[in-house]
Amino acid sequence: MPVLRIKGGTPLRGEIYASGAKNAVLPMTAASVLISGKITLTNCPRITDAETSAEIIKALGGCAEFDKNTLTIDCSGLNLTRIPQRLCEKMRSSITFCGPLLARFGCIGFYEPGGCVLGKRPIDLHIMGFKAMGAEVVEERGKITLKGSLKGAEINLPFPSVGATQSLMAAACLAKGTTVITNPSKEPETLALTDFLNACGGKISFYENRVEIEGVEQLHSAKARVIPDRIEAATYLCAAAATRGKITIRGITLSELGIIGDVLKETSCILTEKENGIFLKAPQQLNSVNEITTAPYPGFPTDLQPQICALLSLAHGKSIVKETVFEARNRHIGELIKTGAEIAEENRSFIISGVDCLKSAGLNAYDLRGGAALVIAALAAKGTSEIHNPHHIFRGYEGLIQKITSLGGNIEIL
Ligand code: EPZ
């Protein structure tokens, strides 16, 4: 089994480009099945989850081909309305194909989605929305079948679920009548999906706390550029901060980084806007951050919680990080402790007492962002660390080894 080997202790220096956002390209690819025509997505990250999305489209009878970072999709020839179980189980985002397929074909069979184990990760909000739009739901032996021609509905999400908002919004584009989703996800990736669907002829309007979708007869071909990946960029900024380095990340702005930039400044990092990029210079001594609580956008993103825990392990003083989105996004904590981090866990809060330095260790990646946190810790630690199960990390970080190497980091895959 492959292993990442990292020799830490070198400050990261230099310049990299932010890749296209994993959590934008996945719902855009899924929504493409609504359109019987050609879709061109540029700035696509070459990550395994994006490859899996293309595989799902091909398994359904469509075409999806990468040419470097451009993905060309054509779903005119779609002839299957069942997503193979092995593909459902490869990633959570397989669920966002269901709404579009149901809307286009009136029937879809699928299985419980896989992906990072961060807690139960039910799909009840997706199902609740499909039922509200008139779908009949049959669940037997793990297989779920949705049937029915969708009509506009009022859907109130008790939690602003990203996936449920995206799947229901896409499905509503072809429903008969108007759908209103209240308390929707406001993540930039959801807004990017809205822009993409509207470019395809959708009629979606986002308001303060609701999104209105007016159903249309059909959608048409379009070309769209995937927005930069704020979580990937922030991960490298944390790595630069943890190694006392200084880097520039091109292709993303401070405003796209949002609250993450404020937190990095609170640790005493210098963070400035450059033309078409962000520059970070780490302080000699990182400062702790009183309390960070993860929350739906515009709150602190849960997808950066593991990485900021790794960074704050080296910050002078005590920091508290509270995870409120997922009930079990904590498997990285035990691994960080192996590197000498001092972290106590109470319910879903992590109390981090900063240490002067981390030490190398044999580590296990259990999920995508937890694995990224271990890369940060290993780059900062003195000595050579090994990270097992790096496939989790390759799901969401394009060119991880090349990017870290170009910043002077010592990383190789064995
Ligand atoms: C998306 O997952 C992202 N994945 C996740 O990123 C991200 O952590 C999450 O949104 C929150 O921002 C993609 O976009 C592909 P949710 P999703 O539905 O849609 C509960 C990464 O590392 N919930 O907003 O699954 C759920 O259990 C990944 O890039 C229900 O209870 O997130 C969780 O506690 C990890 N019922 C909370 O809502 C439902 O039907 C947030 O889930 C759906 C969700």
Image (cartoon, rainbow, N blue to C red):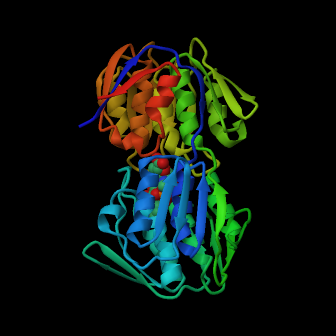
Can residue 161 be seen? no
Q: Quadrant of the C terminus?
A: top left
Compare residues 209 and 104 and report the one nearer the observer. 104
Report the front residue among 201 and 313.
201
Quarter of the image for residue 143 reads bottom left
Task: Determine the residue positioned at 60% across, 48% down.
Answer: 43
Quadrant containing the N terminus in the rendered view: top left
For the point 67% across and 70% down, which residue is it?
200
Give the image location of residue 140, x and y in percent. Answer: 27, 78
The residue located at (51%, 86%) in the rendering is 134
Depicted 102 relative to depicted 290: above or below: below
The quarter holding residue 210 reads: bottom right
Q: Residue at left 56%, top 44%?
A: 301
Task: Residue lying at the far front in this picture: please name it.
Answer: 67
Q: Does 134 appear above or below 378? A: below
Q: Is residue 173 left or right of residue 339?
A: right
Percent coordinates x, y for residue 226 in the rendering = 62, 52
Q: How many marks?
A: 0
Residue 282 visible to an observer of this rendering = yes
Percent x, y of residue 179: 64, 78
Q: Is residue 373 above or below residue 281?
A: below
Q: Position of residue 277 (x, y in %)?
A: 69, 32
